[in-house]
Amino acid sequence: MSVRDRLPRDLAIVIGVADTYVAVRGALRHGLGWDAHAYFLAWPGSLYDVPPGQIDAYNYSPAFAQLIWPLAHLPWPAFCALFVGAAAVGTGWLLRPLRLSVGLPLWFAFTPEILSGNIYWLLAVVAVLGLGRGWPWVLAALTKVLPTPGPLWFLIRGDWGRLTGFAAAFAAVTAVSIASAPDLWRQWFDFLTSHRGDTGAASLAFVPPLWLRLPVALVLLAWGARRDRPWVLAPVMLLATPVVGMGSFALLAALPRLRMQPAAEDHLLSPLVRGEVTRSPGDQG
């Protein structure tokens, strides 16, 4: 095997071993499914009592808490097994296009996400499924909020059908949620505004602040949308994530499937994206 062929495998193994060590330490320190535990405890108390960046802090909209409300009635071991197991299977599905010698160690590289029971892997699935339809992006918009580039991707590309699909689904879900628990939505907005400056301190030390990352994310998204490069959605979502932890890098698990996406059909793109210039009849000839 040539060095060029071995390098991806060897790098994946090194990263996989290092991240598995970090994940196991996290599980020993905080317990298996430490992020999922915040979702489990959301309903018994007030949703937004714990500040962001702390164990058992619930940061998402009331709509997500309402969605998982039936699951919160399960015993904690069953709830934890469901979230951790889903993360393990979902991450495996995202990495399946890779050859086994690379995909398997990369799966271990995402164990901080899997063992924590967070939903970054689910947003990576949203990025893959959301290319062909608008509504999956609602999940990202009502949880992590900023890592929701899908609607802007559709806007830049003039894909009004999928943009309308997202808007309709978002409006419907939000309307039902607000109607059933208006006070929780007020609490969430208060929670977001009162803790808007807390994100930088909670991110990994080497990660630049959000105000530096967001412009880069927007430029990369605009370039990818106009050049028909769906794979940019994964790094854009990572760059736009307010609090970047080890588990956040699971967003990059979407890359193998995003790179498999076929080029968009010409008729789906606006004339601006296709590079066409509309000319009046007098300009012909």
Image (cartoon, rainbow, N blue to C red):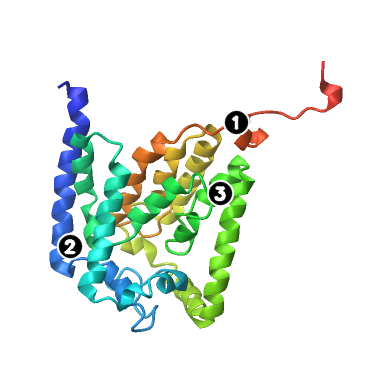
Left or right: residue 40 compared with residue 184? left
Q: Amino acid at mark 2?
A: Gly
For residue 36, the mark is none
Mark nearer the N terminus (2 vs 3): 2
Left or right: residue 257 compared with residue 63? left
Q: Amino acid at mark 1?
A: Asp
Reading the image, the residue beneath label 3 is 152
Give the Cα distance between marks 1 and 3. 19 Å
Mark nearer the N terminus (1 vs 3): 3
**Quadrant housing the N terminus:** top left
The x, y position of residue 71, in whole percent, is 33, 72
The x, y position of residue 182, in whole percent, is 54, 80
Give the Cα distance between marks 2 and 3. 35 Å
Reading the image, the residue beneath label 1 is 266
SS at badge 2: helix
Quick check: can you spot residue 37?
yes
Give the Cα distance between marks 2 and 1. 48 Å
Name the front one of labels 1 and 3: 1
Q: Residue at x 33, y 83 (%)?
A: 44
**Quadrant housing the C terminus:** top right
Q: Categorize mark 3 by other alpha carbons within 10 Å: few (<14), some (14-19), many (20+).
A: some
Mark nearer the N terminus (2 vs 1): 2
Name the front one of labels 2 and 1: 1
Q: Quadrant of residue 59?
A: bottom left
Q: Residue at x 19, y 48 (%)?
A: 108
Reading the image, the residue beneath label 2 is 26
Q: Residue furthest right?
A: 282
The x, y position of residue 109, in whole percent, is 21, 47
Left or right: residue 246 compared with residue 273? left
Quick check: can you spot residue 206?
no
Q: Amino acid at mark 3?
A: Leu
Q: Residue at x 24, y 54 (%)?
A: 88
